[in-house]
């Protein structure tokens, strides 16, 4: 029989040719077949990939899919889907989908699903509780009885962020159809009002939205870079976006700082501990003194904190306080936050039994919640947004910050000032804030992470209808969470340093905690509340917040699990004299601060530990950029330059302060500081001195630039050889710069 298939129009061929990667073809064909008509859901369609797996094909070979709308006609239309040009040798994603339902894989998966007697409908109850909250708000409003409750809108507000083109285009189509199904289509009239409150990058529908513009549109990194310009020719990481691609009338500026693949990542993890947070701040202050007064947060790319650690992280990164300023603010906050209630004043102290005291405190908080709320609002402001709260140059230099909180069902979640794609098998869930109506304030995040049961009421977030308590119930030491966030945010960037700070340790206190922190979501403290006979479990969970020994055990386990990176992970914690300071012992703050200062200043080993860490942080402020490469039969040549992470455009003048530190080192020995570049394991091939003229330029002009012609050229064995760049600050003081050592094949 003669084929009657007609060729595609040229426009369609051109469109197909342009969509070479990121599952564009598969997503579009999937939408044309299934997304536009519910009755076509049974027809076969391509698997849609995700933006983060852009180098993996969604399917192998070439597949033809029929258009269901004209299947009965004499001229059926076929859509051809094939592997893109960038697919390479990676296994297609469809292979994983097929394996999921294979007999072996299915049995293994089912074997892990064990139905426990206390689980079941209560899990469903937890999931549906936010909907009840939205419904209550709707029917309690002025027009609640005049309009039906929009269950779909509530569902979308609780969904995770869309991850790929397929999700985004279907989501956009469903919103448009739901909103304007019976109206004349006016693209601008429909699109503009709704475009500022969508969990996707509407400029490309491809990637995770990360950057909030002044007009409240959110762009992914690629679109933000495409729309922006370099702020400074000497710093290709700093981008300024002048115009929104979705709203040309908006000309507000947004500054963006990029994490380049040449760099490593520096992570700071802060423990919870109530008023013992002053110990953390005292340690950070000792570090700052060794860093020439440069704020400590300037040396980290990511800060993750639990409870008081989350509050400190907000003060350092979002407010830009130095450790000294943060310590003073912290004392003021504690003085205002711990206002005892009637229960704490008269009932709790008169009861003879700790268990009964605990039970009363569980239902009636010991401290007035209004006190801590007012203190946090005064410290961080009532209207400062957590995600997308600033667009100026200073905001671009802030590290990313995440705080650990606990949902009402016991699951740990992250409340962060950034956005990322969701991921399975993580230590924490992730609260996405791309919807304008669901954005958190800074003080709200601080309140959620520090809502310790029995001390304060749980925190209820009005926009989402969910309740939260202290993150220490699951991760009082969030070091595992911090490491995982680094891997999710910058999977291609190695770890430079991970610094974990404790809140003091009293070793001879009675140990009432188990050997390991309980994994998240094992029933949850709200669920156990229903069985008063199981108060031991609630008490054990709360001990994770107050007991410092458990955080130390978590670190010991983390060290054991990361032996290969042991030189890059550091724990700073000091012993404290008994008695153990409770979370609310405000009168102990001054003594703990002085005790910590004495510990790190007088003990020789402790001083050397801080000195070494400070020098390593200084070295991590520099990175090596590859400008060109050349290969021959016997070696692989690399030419590049050493740059500083700090920008000469910054008002805080970090480069100038670095220059003053270098000047003090050079006074002691004119041979230093200098950089040594070599192949890992070999003698130094190239030495680059930081001369007086370079240091003078740093101090006077806040600029780190070597004289013209002093670029680095080094010969390696092959493309997979590791290049090692170290900063030498003395005869026996050699510290790796950021991203060193690493193979050139990963960044060329």
Image (cartoon, grey):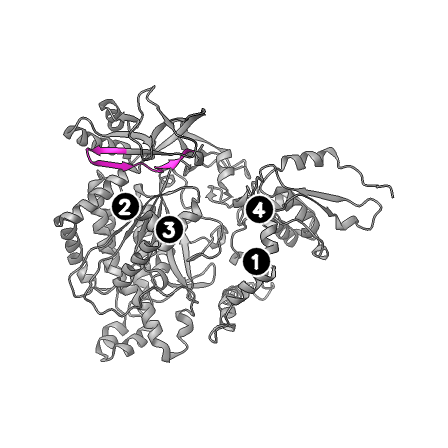
Label 3 vs label 4: CA separation? 28 Å
The percent coordinates of residue 406 (x first, y second) are 39, 62
| Depth order, front residue of 530/5 | 5
| For marks 3 and 1 on the same chain, the one whose residue lies earlier in the sequence | 1
Magenta segment boundaries in residue numbering: 727-744
Q: Nearer the viewer, mark 3 or mark 1?
A: 3
Quadrant for the N terminus, please: top right
Q: Which residue is mark 3?
A: 483
Q: For the residues marked 4 and 2, what is the alpha-carbon distance in whole angstroms?
A: 48 Å
Alpha-carbon distance for marks 3 and 1? 34 Å
- Mark 4 or 1, closer to the camera: 4
Disc number for residue 521: none
Q: Secondary structure at mark 4?
A: loop
Label 2 or label 1, whichever comes before in sequence order: 1
Return the disc, 4 or 1, that comes first in the chain's sequence: 4
Whether the residues at callouts 4 and 1 have beta carbons within 8 Å, the answer is no
| Apparent side of residue 154 relative to residue 622 in the rendered image (left or right) | right
Q: Earlier in the sequence, mark 3 or mark 4?
A: 4
Question: Helix, strand or loop at disc 3?
Answer: helix
In the rendering, which numbered label is found on residue 321?
2
Q: Is residue 151 visible?
A: no
Q: Secondary structure at mark 2?
A: loop
Q: Is residue 86 above or below residue 463?
A: above
Between marks 4 and 1, how big is the CA–CA gap? 37 Å
| Residue position marked by numbered label 4 in the rendering | 91
Closer mark to the observer between disc 3 and disc 4: 4
């Amino acid at each position: 029989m003669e084929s009657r298939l007609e060729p595609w129009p040229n426009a369609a061929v051109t469109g197909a040719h342009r969509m070479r990667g990121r599952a564009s073809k598969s997503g579009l064909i999937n939408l044309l077949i299934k997304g536009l008509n519910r009755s076509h859901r049974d027809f076969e369609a391509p698997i849609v990939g995700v933006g983060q797996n852009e180098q993996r094909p969604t399917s192998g070979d070439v597949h033809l899919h029929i258009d269901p709308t004209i299947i009965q006609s004499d001229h059926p239309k076929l859509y051809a889907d094939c592997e893109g040009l960038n697919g390479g040798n990676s296994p297609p994603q469809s292979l994983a989908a097929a394996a999921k339902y294979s007999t072996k894989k299915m049995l293994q998966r089912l074997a892990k699903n064990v139905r426990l007697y206390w689980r079941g409908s209560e899990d469903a109850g937890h999931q549906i509780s936010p909907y009840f909250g939205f419904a209550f708000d709707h029917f309690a409003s002025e027009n609640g009885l005049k309009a039906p409750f929009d269950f779909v809108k509530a569902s979308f507000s609780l969904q995770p962020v869309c991850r790929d083109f397929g999700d985004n285009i279907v989501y956009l189509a469903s919103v448009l159809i739901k909103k304007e199904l019976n109206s004349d289509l006016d693209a601008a009239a429909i699109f503009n009002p709704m475009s500022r409150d969508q969990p996707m990058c509407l400029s490309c529908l491809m990637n995770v939205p990360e950057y909030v513009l002044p007009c409240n549109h959110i762009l992914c990194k690629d679109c933000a870079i495409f729309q922006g310009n370099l702020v400074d020719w000497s710093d290709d990481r700093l981008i300024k976006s002048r115009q929104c691609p979705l709203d040309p009338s908006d000309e507000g500026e947004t500054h963006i700082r990029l994490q380049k693949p040449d760099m490593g990542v520096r992570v700071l993890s802060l423990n919870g501990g109530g008023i013992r947070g002053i110990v953390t701040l005292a340690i950070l202050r000792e570090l700052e003194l060794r860093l020439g007064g440069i704020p400590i947060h300037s040396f980290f790319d990511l800060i993750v904190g639990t409870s008081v650690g989350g509050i400190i992280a907000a003060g350092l990164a979002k407010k830009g306080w130095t450790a000294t300023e943060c310590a003073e603010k912290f004392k003021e906050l504690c003085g205002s936050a711990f206002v005892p209630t009637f229960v704490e004043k008269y009932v709790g102290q008169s009861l003879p039994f700790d268990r009964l005291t605990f039970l009363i405190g569980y239902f009636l908080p010991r401290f007035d919640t209004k006190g801590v709320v007012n203190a946090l609002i005064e410290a961080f402001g009532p209207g400062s947004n957590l995600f997308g709260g600033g667009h100026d140059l200073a905001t671009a230099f802030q590290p990313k910050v995440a705080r650990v909180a606990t949902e009402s069902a016991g699951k740990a979640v992250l409340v962060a000032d950034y956005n990322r794609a969701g991921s399975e098998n993580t230590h924490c869930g992730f609260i996405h804030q791309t919807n304008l109506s669901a954005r958190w304030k800074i003080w709200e995040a601080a309140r959620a992470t520090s809502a310790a049961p029995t001390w304060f009421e749980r925190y209820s977030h009005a926009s989402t209808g969910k309740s939260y308590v202290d993150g220490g119930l699951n991760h009082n030491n969030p070091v595992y969470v911090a490491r995982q966030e680094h891997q999710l945010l910058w999977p291609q960037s190695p770890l430079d340093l991970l610094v974990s700070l404790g809140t003091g340790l009293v070793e001879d206190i009675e140990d009432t905690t188990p050997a390991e922190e309980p994994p998240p979501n094992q029933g949850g403290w709200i669920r156990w509340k229903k069985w008063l006979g199981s108060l031991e479990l609630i008490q054990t969970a709360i001990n994770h917040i107050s007991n410092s020994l458990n955080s130390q055990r978590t670190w010991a386990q983390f060290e054991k699990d990361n032996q290969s990176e042991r030189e890059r992970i550091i724990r700073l914690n000091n012993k404290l004299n008994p008695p153990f300071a409770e979370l609310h012992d405000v009168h102990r703050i001054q003594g703990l601060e002085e005790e910590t200062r004495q510990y790190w200043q007088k003990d020789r080993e402790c001083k050397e530990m801080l000195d070494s860490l400070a020098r390593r942080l200084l070295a991590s402020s520099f990175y090596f950029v590859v400008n060109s490469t050349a290969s021959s039969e016997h070696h692989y040549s690399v030419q590049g330059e050493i740059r500083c992470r700090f920008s000469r455009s910054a008002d805080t003048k970090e480069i100038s302060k670095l220059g003053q530190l270098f000047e003090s080192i050079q006074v002691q020995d004119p041979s230093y500081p200098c950089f040594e570049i070599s192949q890992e394991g070999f003698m130094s091939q190239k030495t680059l001195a930081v001369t007086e003229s370079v240091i003078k330029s740093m101090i006077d002009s806040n600029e780190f630039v070597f004289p013209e012609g002093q670029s680095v050229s080094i010969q390696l064995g092959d493309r997979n050889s590791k290049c090692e760049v170290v900063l030498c600050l003395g005869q026996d003081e050699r510290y790796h710069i950021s991203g060193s050592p690493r193979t050139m094949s990963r960044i060329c």
